[in-house]
Amino acid sequence: MKRYIIHSDEQKAMYEVLCNTLATDKNILFAYVHGSFVSDEHFNDIDVAVYVKNVPASIVEYELNLELQLMKCLGKYIVDVRVLNQAPLSFQYNVIRRGKLLFAIDDDERSEFQEKTVLLYLDFLPYRKRYLQEVCGDII
């Protein structure tokens, strides 16, 4: 898979394109960019997570349509979109913790989602650690 390096000015411009494009979808209440595009100097793709007002009947189709729309706007970069509403708890937590908020149409909804996700994750964390220790042993 191809890896990209961009300067901070180009990254800022890409954030703006992501924000402007996603904001046209009135179903999206807030969106994050996360993964290597945010945290590393090199990246393979641009990971985007969106929280929607109304969960579509086909989440996969919705995600693919958003990916295509964003890739048309960004040009050569691959975009991976996930709907946060029904994503696994650990994914939601990592997006909140390590991602960058692109925009929030409804900041109250975003704050409530963030608070609920963090509390649920921290409640779940001891069980997750125990499970991983039992399954993986000293590997982790």
Image: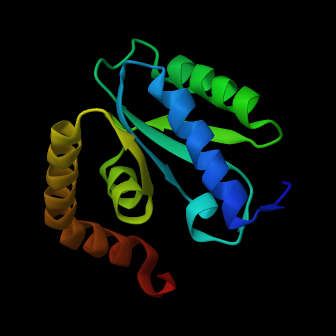
Judged left or right of residue 43, residue 99 is: left
Foreground residue, 136 or 76?
Answer: 76
Number of marks: 0
In the image as oriented, which residue stretches furthest toward the bottom? 138
Residue 16 lies in what quarter of the image?
A: top right
Judged left or right of residue 128, residue 119 is: left
Q: In this view, does 117 lie above or below 36?
A: above
Q: In this view, does 61 lie above or below 35?
A: above
The chosen color scheme is: rainbow
Across and down, in percent, residue 15 comes to 58, 48
Across and down, in percent, residue 80 comes to 62, 40
Foreground residue, 133 or 67?
Answer: 67
Q: Residue at x 77, y 43 (%)?
A: 77
Q: Which residue is drawn at 23% across and 34% down?
A: 106
Residue 122 lies in what quarter of the image?
A: bottom left
Across and down, in percent, residue 72 comes to 75, 27
Judged left or right of residue 133, residue 60 is: right
Q: Is residue 86 above or below residue 62?
A: below
Q: Residue at x 35, y 46 (%)?
A: 88
Across and down, in percent, residue 132 comes to 37, 71
Judged left or right of residue 136, residue 11 is: right
Q: Which residue is drawn at 30% across and 17% down?
A: 54
In the image as oriented, which residue stretches furthest toward the top? 57
Q: Is residue 74 above or below residue 138?
A: above
Q: Quadrant of the N terminus?
A: bottom right
